[in-house]
Amino acid sequence: MAGPPRSVLLVSRSRPSGRRCRPSVPSLVGTVVLDQDWYECARGSVKTATPREERRTRLAESVWQIVLDHGVSAVSVRTVAANAGMAVGSLRHLFPTQAALLEFSAELMVERATARVVAITPHDDDAVAYAFAVISELLPLAPHTRREFELNVALIAETPAHPGLARIRDHTHQELLRVFTRLAARLRGEPEPTPASAKEGQRLLALVDGLGLHLIHRPAGEDTTWAADLVREELARLAVHG
């Protein structure tokens, strides 16, 4: 298997329980080399996943489905166990509390988005194309990313009652800010981020967040070309004007 690409994205850290992908360096986009074991894990190498971890993943996916279909208020030990085809006692053995289940579900969602972006091959000769490929995995431009974005918004709404979800939200936001700062620096032709690229990165992240919310307020299946074009225009502006 080939080693890590020169530019990678990471927006999630390891969880305290279970088998996790553990990065050996801070999370950022740029000239970074990740630990090979983490890289293979983040790319989706799940051949060594234990039966316990597979059951935990199945429960997390059931949480996602229930949240998307009925809202977070419908998530309970019984509804999740029933959706996953698992006994309540088995669920409690894996997740002693509902909060632990929600946190695992949120972090697994972030890790999967991370893995998709890590798999993107950097465009060394086209910074705009690379940045757009990264952002496309984070914007609700396709059915799978729309569901992910809707799920993220629903879980964020629960943060006042779930400190663990608030921690995940805040950490992910800071990681994304680093990522977008690195993307801005790359577009501007900077070897390392500067205060100017940090400001542009913040602007770019705000644009993507706002676009994402706007898109999920529109009917599913509606044409999203205009949003993709807007992102490309902003990336082109950064690449030309810096």
Image (cartoon, helix red, strand yellow):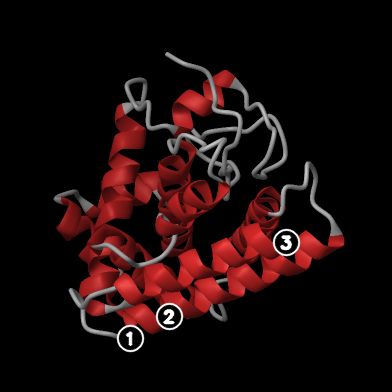
Q: Is residue 203 left or right of residue 11?
A: right
Res. 109 mark: none
Residue behind mark 2: 213
Q: Quadrant of residue 1?
A: top left
Q: Residues within 10 Å of mark 1 (few under 14, many from 20)?
A: few
- Residue 171 visible? The answer is no
Residue behind mark 1: 217
- Residue 204 visible? The answer is yes
Q: Quadrant of residue 16?
A: top right
Q: Amino acid at mark 1?
A: His
Res. 242 mark: 3
Query: Measuring 43% from the left and 68% from the top, which residue is drawn there?
Result: 152
Q: Is residue 11 left or right of residue 53?
A: right
Query: Measuring 53% from the left and 40% from the top, which residue is drawn there?
Result: 17
Of pointers 1 and 3, the one earlier in the residue sequence: 1
Q: Are marks 1 and 2 in contact (CB under 8 Å)?
A: yes
Q: Is residue 190 above or below residue 78?
A: above
Residue 187 position, x and y percent, is: 65, 53
Q: Is residue 43 above or below residue 207?
A: above
- Measure the C-alpha gap from mark 1 to mark 2: 6 Å
Q: Amino acid at mark 2?
A: Leu
Residue 191 position, x and y percent, is: 78, 41
Q: Secondary structure at mark 3?
A: loop
Q: Residues within 10 Å of mark 3 (few under 14, many from 20)?
A: some
Q: Is residue 171 left or right of residue 232?
A: right
Q: Secondary structure at mark 1?
A: loop
Residue 208 position, x and y percent, is: 51, 71
